[in-house]
Structure formats: C-alpha cells, structure tokens
Image (cartoon, rainbow, N blue to C red):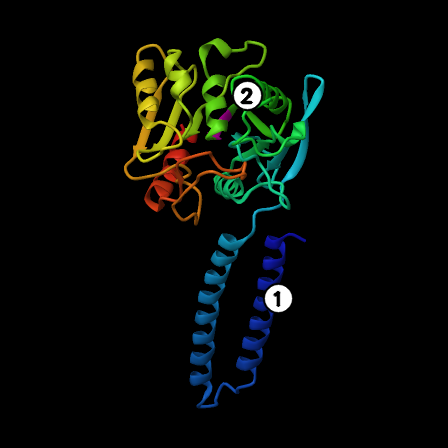
Amino acid sequence: MSAGQTHRFVMNFRIWRMVAYCHGALSSQHHDDPANPMRLLSVISFLTLFAMSFVVESAFAVEAAPLPAPHQVDIPLGTGTLHAQLYKPDGDGPFPTVIGLHGCGGLGGHSESVLPRYRDWAEQLVKTGHAVLLPDSYGSRELGPQCRVKERHVLARRERVADIIATRQWLVQQPWAAHGRISLIGWANGASALLWAVRPQLSSRSTEPDFRSAIAFYPDCRVSNGLGWSARVPTLLLIGAKDDVSSPSACRQMVDGARGRSALTRIEIYPGAPHDFDRANLPLHAVGAGSDATVPEHGHIGTDADARADSQKRVAEWLAR
C-alpha cells in the first residue's frame, strides 16, 4: 500500500468513527429533552473542528509524501549499457520528461543511487507532472567522481553527448513519455555536455522530434564561447555572478554571440551567487587542495537562497513553454 493509500484509509476510518459518534450522540437524547439543542450545538462544533483538521492533515500528507524510490533502467549504449535512475508520476502518461545530467561529482554516493541535490530537483519536477530520467555517465563505466581527475576518459563533448543521444532514443520508445516534450537539464559538467548536445551540428534526423528545451546550471562556457556556440533548441543558462569555478562572463559572451543565429537563448546571472547556488543547505565555503574528487579543484560553493528560489521558478516556466 502506498503512502497516499495508507493516508486515505486512515482518514476514511476516522470519518467512520466520527459518524458513529455523532449518530450515537444525537440518538441518545429525547427530542423533548431541554438539553437536546445544546447537544446538537456540541455535535455541530465537533463536526466543524473535525473537518478543519481533516483538510489540514490531508494537505500536510500530500506535501510531506516522500518521493518514491527511483527505478533503475538500462539503456543500450554502443557496446555497453548506460544505467539510469527513473522517477515517474503515478499513472500511464504520457508525461513530459526531463533528462537530468549530473556534475563531475557523479550521480550517486556510497550508499545512495541519487545524491540529494538531484533527488531534490526530481521531487520538484515530479510534483509538476514530469518524469525525470538521470543517466549515470560515470557509474555505468565503473568510474567514480571525476572532478579532480587530470586525464578524464568521459568527456562532456564526447561520451556524455553520446549518453544524451542514447537516452533520448530510448525515451522515444517508451509509451509513458511524451515524445514531443523531452527536455534537458544539467549541472556543471553535465551542463557543459548539454551545451554540446544542443548545438546545430549535433542535430539528428534519425530521432524525431528534437528536445523541447534545455536548462544549463553554471556550465563552463569558455570552450563553447571560443567556438562560436549556438543552440538549435530554446536554452536557458543560470549562473551566479560570484561563480569562481565556472565563468559567468564567458557564458554572457557566449549567449550574446549566439543572438541572430540561434534558437531562443536566455541567461540569468544572479548577483552574489556562487557555484552550486541551487543546492539546499550548503554553507558557503572554499574548496582547495585535497583528494575529494566530488568537488572542484578551486573556488567557492554554497547555497544562495534567493537564487535557488528564483531558479526553481524559472525552470518551471521554461519547461512549461
């Protein structure tokens, strides 16, 4: 029994008990009993309070219902297999679907298949009716976090683009996915891969329709900017002005340079926001020398509450286009 079904069962049982109580209370008094009006008033008051508590508890239960555990799916990828974690609303669909692209720290941790930062976004997107598919570009190749690996064997412009293409090809074969509403969202290294995947040069007529839209959180725009980047699908960039891991100025130049020869592109640079600003409850701190391959080699990372809230709103609006 799901959490929602359990809650409905408990509520229905409480209603049954309440009805039985009220029936007994009213029938225990004779109609000519002078106390009967007071008993009736008491029952009405009880019904009102019960109804109010029922509404509040129901709303809380819906809000607090945990996100169901993801379901692993295996996607054909050349000679190997790309593992991915799928979050999907209840029902048969078809659902608008978002492909989520993890950063250089990887998709999961030692004891969890999906890190809280990506689970948090998946929960928000599922609540708005989206399915979310998170391909694991590193774990599928038996690799750990890559943030501080000097010679990477999984590159944003090559292997990760191949993962994106394979994921879309798999999705268009799924009856629960709305094939015309498949979008991309990526963070850091995943956002850099996204920039490569939406270039006009990567257009593939073998899989139609194309992506609906794309959203890139703090990508490294320096290489793409130097290559005269443009996009074939509407693309939104979100980055902090204080991001000293990526380069806000390079992203601004890249987007400005694409105007007139690109699909719709927008950039939002949040004043004062650092790298990883959309992560929840992450105190601002510097990252430096060390062996932690899940964080960048330099710079500052941390939550910016205002930028986080605004980005959530903008993501919802961009996906609803």
Q: Label for residue 251?
A: none
Q: Is residue 90 left or right of residue 40?
A: right
Name the residue nearer the viewer: 37 or 146.
146
Residue to which mark 1 is pinned: 13
Question: Which percent across, then down, holds residue 52?
Answer: 44, 66
Residue drawn at x 44%, y 47% is 280
Residue drawn at x 59%, y 10% is 206
How many numbered dots are placed on residues in this image?
2
Question: Which percent across, then down, holds residue 113?
Answer: 62, 41
Say what secondary structure mark 1 lies in.
Answer: helix
Of all residues, the one furthest to the right in this rendering is 79
Circle 2 packing at 10 Å, graded few (<14), some (14-19), many (20+), is some
Identify the mark nearer the N-term, 2 or 1.
Answer: 1
Question: Which percent across, then down, holds residue 172?
Answer: 60, 22
Residue to which mark 2 is pinned: 155
Q: Is residue 101 above or below residue 1?
A: above
Name the residue nearer the viewer: 63 or 248.
248
Q: Amino acid at mark 2?
A: Leu
Say what secondary structure mark 2 lies in.
Answer: loop
Residue drawn at x 56%, y 72% is 18
Position of the C terminus by quadrant: top left
Question: Which percent across, then down, holds residue 76?
Answer: 69, 22
Q: Is residue 261 above or below residue 304?
A: above
Name the residue nearer the viewer: 6 or 105.
105
Q: Is residue 148 magenta?
A: no
Residue extent of the magenta highlight: 182-186
Of all residues, the one furthest to the bottom in this rendering is 34
Q: Is residue 287 left or right of residue 178?
A: left
